[in-house]
Image (cartoon, coloured by chain):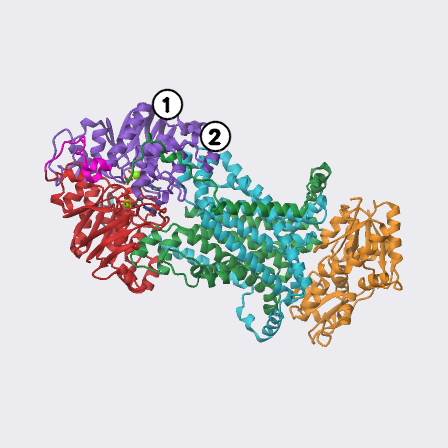
Chain colours: A green, B red, C purple, D cyan, E orange
Amino acid sequence: MQRRHGTTAANPPWRLPPPLFSARCKACWYTAAALALVVGSFWSLDLQWGAFVSMDALRSMGRFVAEFYPPDFSPPFVAKVAWSAVETLAMSALGTLLAAVAGLALALPASRRHEGDAARFRSVARMLLNALRAVPELVWAALLLIAAGLGPFAGTLALALHTSGVLGRLFAEAMENAPRDAATALRTQGVTGWRVLAYATLPQVLPQLLSYTLYRWENNIRAAAVLGVVGAGGLGQLLAFHMGLFHMGKTATVLIAMLLLVAFVDGLSFAMRRWMK
Amino acid sequence: MHLTLHQVDAAHPAARRGAAPALRGISLSLAPGEQVALIGPSGAGKTTLLQVAAAALRPSGGRVEMDGTDPWTLSVRALQRLRGRLLLAPQVPPLPPRQRVITAVLAARLPAMSFWTSLRSLFYPVDIPGAHQALERFDLAEKLFERVDHLSGGERQRVGLARALLAPASLWLVDEPLSALDPRRADEAVRTLLDEARARGATLLASLHQVDVALERFTRVIALRDGAVFFDLPSAQVTPQRLRQLYAQHEDELHAPAPALDTPAPGPAPVVMHCR
Amino acid sequence: MHLTLHQVDAAHPAARRGAAPALRGISLSLAPGEQVALIGPSGAGKTTLLQVAAAALRPSGGRVEMDGTDPWTLSVRALQRLRGRLLLAPQVPPLPPRQRVITAVLAARLPAMSFWTSLRSLFYPVDIPGAHQALERFDLAEKLFERVDHLSGGERQRVGLARALLAPASLWLVDEPLSALDPRRADEAVRTLLDEARARGATLLASLHQVDVALERFTRVIALRDGAVFFDLPSAQVTPQRLRQLYAQHEDELHAPAPALDTPAPGPAPVVMHCR
Amino acid sequence: MSAALSPRVPRRDPAWLKRVSWTATALVLLWPLLVLTEFRPAQLWSPESRAPILNFLGSFVPPAHSAEFLEMVARETWRTVAMATAGIVLGLVIAIPGALLATEALSVSLLSGRMAPLPRVVRQGVRWMLIVLRSVPELVWALVFVRVAGLGATPGVLAIALTYGGMLGKVYAEILDSGEAPPAQALLRNGAGRLQAFTYALLPQNAAELASYTVYRWECAIRSSVVLGFVGAGGLGQQMDSSMKMFNGGEVATMLLVFVALVALADRTSAALRRQLG
Amino acid sequence: QATVFRVTAIPDESPTELARKAAPLMKYLEGKLGMKVEYTPVTDYAAAVEALVNKKVDLAWFGGFTFVQANVRSGGKVVPLVQREEDEKFRSVFITADPAIKSLADLKGRDLSFGSQSSTSGHLMPRHFLLAAGIEPERDLKRVAFSGAHDATIAAVASGKVQAGALNISVWDKFVADKKVDTARVRVFYTTPAYYDYNWTVHADMPAAQKDKLSAAFLALDKSTPEGAQVLELQRATRFIPTKAENYKSIEGAARSAGLL
Ligand SMILES: Nc1ncnc2c1ncn2[C@@H]1O[C@H](COP(=O)(O)OP(=O)(O)OP(=O)(O)O)[C@@H](O)[C@H]1O
Ligand SMILES: Nc1ncnc2c1ncn2[C@@H]1O[C@H](COP(=O)(O)OP(=O)(O)OP(=O)(O)O)[C@@H](O)[C@H]1O
Ligand SMILES: [Mg+2]
Ligand SMILES: [Mg+2]
């Protein structure tokens, strides 16, 4: 209320436009850098779009897809696929569960949840999270296979290690981003630490955390497929085996099983979010 | 608790550069057990003042003292302990969605709860009767196990107030406690707050837009305008003329003869009407 | 716009089973250009009624009609077009954090904007003067380019109201527009709303807790209690006795002789005092 | 106001039984998981497994640093970054419309309680499409595209685009749904269009989250070791895969360092984006 | 496509190794064919098969089994041109680092790693001879893994990840010769009988003149010239000889009986 702006003034304040671009506008530079990267990428890759326009190309793709029909639904094979699916599900579920717990534990020191937060271990925790997730599952698996031998245990741990890096980071960001008023209210009352977390921050970010976790689970179903190739068993091993041998019918069955697993987790995450609403 | 502010300036960390500070040279002193209303036009700095008084916002100048100690010189631990003795109820009740009323209300007890009790309370509320009683004071007992995001606006606000009753605080800083309440419940709420504060000897500072309530129920009224104290008087000395000036919109109105408001000027002592 | 409700029942989808419905058998009719205040105790169903009137909540029974058509029989397209002609300003202003005031205010224009214009407006606001003027009506012009999460509570509320002035609507449903405003700005805001609505011939239904404002400024007052219409009268016929009954807390108070409120019973016509 | 008439204090939390039974169910479900995955942590520390793993880890130092190898790593790194970028950009073409169609935050009919049948079908359809896109492994997509584009970067990039399109679409939709609903609802209720509600209410809230998720996915695409090598597109992931299979610790270490650097870069970028948008 | 001649190979060894091996041969072919020759390493057997069947590459290095797969998938439209002399009598070896394993029968209840599932010498033929010895891998072994490539199998056995592995004898010999494996610990405990394996295959639609030019180029490789010596050395071949589809009938039979085709 310091100054009153009349609409009749010679140069009313609204005539002064907010600048759209200035050299200090970091966002503009980021946009430019991103554009340069995208253009550079496409330019250096010489992708062959021409090949896709012909009718022939589409027909040939169609033929490949058609080979998947009919899927092999013979009972022994379906039983085998079902068992592998259970194995994959177990590996991915336990891996994700462990990762969610470890990720949350690491996300706490890695996030600055309020202005006054010194967050002393933030950079250390972030570095640890980065390292965990910079190492791909496959590398973790190879390391752990040496230690634990072939089998699902190594695969599970590999998933858990990589995923805790991923989830830890996502959790930390979700918590830093959450609305702060509820937590601030408790904090001005002298409550600290995990109790603020449990009574104010978590109820707010829980859907987000849950949805990231479930989503990572889904991802890990696919990742478990890759690990299967290294001898961890499950759908992945079946897929690689039959796909490599061009057993298209059997491959189709395995694909359907994977689709169902992913759809199951997707449905679960949908239901969870609905339930939390 | 004894609260003193000496020449306090404060600005919001996110405020744009060049903006006027939200508080300028505020000095005031609240005796233990005093009950003070804070009034002033929108944007005057009431919320900011409450935040400063709650040691939630660090003043950019001046000194805050609580029972003689400056909270900003304390160690983190001691500051936390000090904060355990005060309660700030924000303008918008800070209730995390999806939380149940009982959990939200019991959260006020956290400073006094041990680690294990607070953990246990997440799974099974520790003090159902206590929460029930606090809610009942605000006529909300039947919503005890409801989720806070399933409440109406006024119900949420009352949940926020019920927290005050459970907090182990000796300084209550309440921001616009009545904004979403109907006259009857507003009256009841303010009486409950005052009675409880008196019973515990807690100092109460409440910002209000309901001038009539402020004048009738509180013994002292502090008015803010543009970040500075406009007046700080016993309620009986607050004249309609002063109020008009307080809420006047433009500088010129402040000094010019009071514009003809469309209200007949009331007598010297404020008479409270059915508008409560 | 002509709004009619016939025997409308409504319940919140998330309400727990067995809870009483939020609205029971509401019938009312608003003529085009009428200006009606909606009062009632907290939790009475005011917000719910406004939602039903805005075709935002589907009634579980009864019929809603806007200019003679039931919105729930319309196709989605037609319903969305119809919604373009009404404005619901919620109790808590729905402002996304990080947005600037000007963008938030101009968002009211969206139904009338093409997609490209609205996209362009994100990069450079299309109607700065219009937004400035609307904000000026609420004494907030200097916050034009501020971020909404850097505003005080009352300022946010006024941003929400300024949206109404820009919306191309002929039915305004405003939920507690004055809750966070000081008396002077509240008076100004309600006058602005009423004047603008009158100037455009828009129907205005505003829920309020400020009974004095409702009686003084609006010609008709609808009172809700426990989800049903308690009275629906011209303002002049609303007696203090009726108001006491409306806000009474317990069923027994409703029928027993009115308890001695700590207010001297005022004369038949409500006198508005400085409590505005 | 019935409670005032019967001011009985509730004795028990009504949600208690439900909580106990859910916790019990979860614990019961955990058991078969532990059995199926042969969860025996002690095994990791058995003496016979300690020696080989220490051996392998020992071979990490010194990291491979011959000029030839470093040059190869640099070349492959750029190639991977380029392919990941191209793949993600093409993926966005699928993900953005998919997310806009799938998110419930923009449902007009949901405003009034229940979603209408047609939008529900569309939404389900889009969700299934996204599920199919991301649950078919990259190798299958790659083989489909090998038929038309031959070996090289094209099928790899397309395979990334399809799978990542499906993933991003789903996550975008969930991010939009888990934000605060009232601003978008208010706009829709006042008659604004879906895209308008998206740009005016959902984006300002969620832009930071969306941007940082995209950067994270980009980083994943770089790491993704399987897709690109299949079809001869090369890339750092493929190198890593083969060095790993050969237990060539030095090479693995060098590439891990590159990965860590890329991850740190992505982290910085995303933090900066967050600060800008948040 | 007329200007570039595209070549690929199944990734029975790590792609970097393959690319290194292929470089001199490509240069040699470039000279003989008079056009640019481009080599693309892939990490998946199926990708190589699909690429040749769909004429996305002109020449491919196949194993016996991959050739059969390509032959079946193209409806007999691929032609094997040449093979190494060694490929007429190719063998696989079973290796182990476990002193307790002395014969195929000892494998029961142990872990075994094959190479790739599409490999002839790393999977099909070892499986064939295991079956002949009365061992059904899925039933009798504890776990079957696919390392993906022959060298990877050696590494897996040497590191103790699996107790036994089956692979291509020429890779094994190469590893032993280069001392890349500790023969005191890892040893061969079974060598299979001989069978036909690797060849260079083209699509049947390739013009006859080019086909002839190509086989002539391969057949002309000779250890006495420095260039020929280098190529043959890297290909681990003494010389190339012509081959024909009929040679691989027995592999096809083995594949069918093992249920892999
Ligand atoms: N989202 C919701 N889910 C379930 N129940 C609700 C929800 N919102 C409100 N209710 C219940 O519906 C009833 C009417 O609520 P409504 O919000 O309409 O009240 P109101 O008259 O606006 O009250 P106030 O003055 O406090 O804003 C209340 O009992 C409330 O608890
Ligand atoms: N988070 C913030 N960042 C920057 N400036 C702020 C912030 N919050 C408030 N302000 C500004 O500080 C000044 C004082 O705000 P404050 O919230 O204290 O006012 P108030 O007296 O509580 O008003 P109201 O009655 O509207 O709630 C106002 O000009 C306001 O715009
Ligand atoms: Mg305030
Ligand atoms: Mg309401």
How far separated are the C-alphas under marks 1 and 2? 25 Å
Which secondary structure, mark 1?
Answer: loop
Q: Which residue is mark 2?
A: C114
Q: Main secondary structure of the magenta part?
A: loop
* Vertical relation: D61 (above or below) D113: below
Amino acid type of the residue that numbered disc 2 sits on in the rendered structure: Ser
Q: Which mark is residue C235?
A: none
- Note whether residue B129 is visible: no
Q: Which residues are magenta?
A: B244-267
Q: Residue D258's spot in the image, x, y percent?
A: 59, 60
Magenta highlight on residue A123: no
Decide: few, some or many residues near mark 2? Use Cα within 10 Å; few <14, some 14-19, many ≥20: some
Chain bearing mark 2: C
* Vertical relation: A12 (above or below) A152: above
| Quadrant position of the N terminus of chain D in the picture | top left
Chain bearing mark 1: C
Query: Toward the viewer: A224 or C87?
Result: C87
Left or right, C88 with respect to C187, comes to right
Left or right, C205 with respect to E187, comes to left
Magenta highlight on residue B262: yes
Left or right, A25 with respect to B243, comes to right
Q: Residue A233's spot in the image, x, y percent?
A: 62, 60
Amino acid type of the residue that numbered disc 1 sits on in the rendered structure: Asp
Q: Which residue is mark 1?
A: C67
Query: Toward the viewer: D84 or E174?
Result: D84
Which secondary structure, mark 2?
Answer: loop
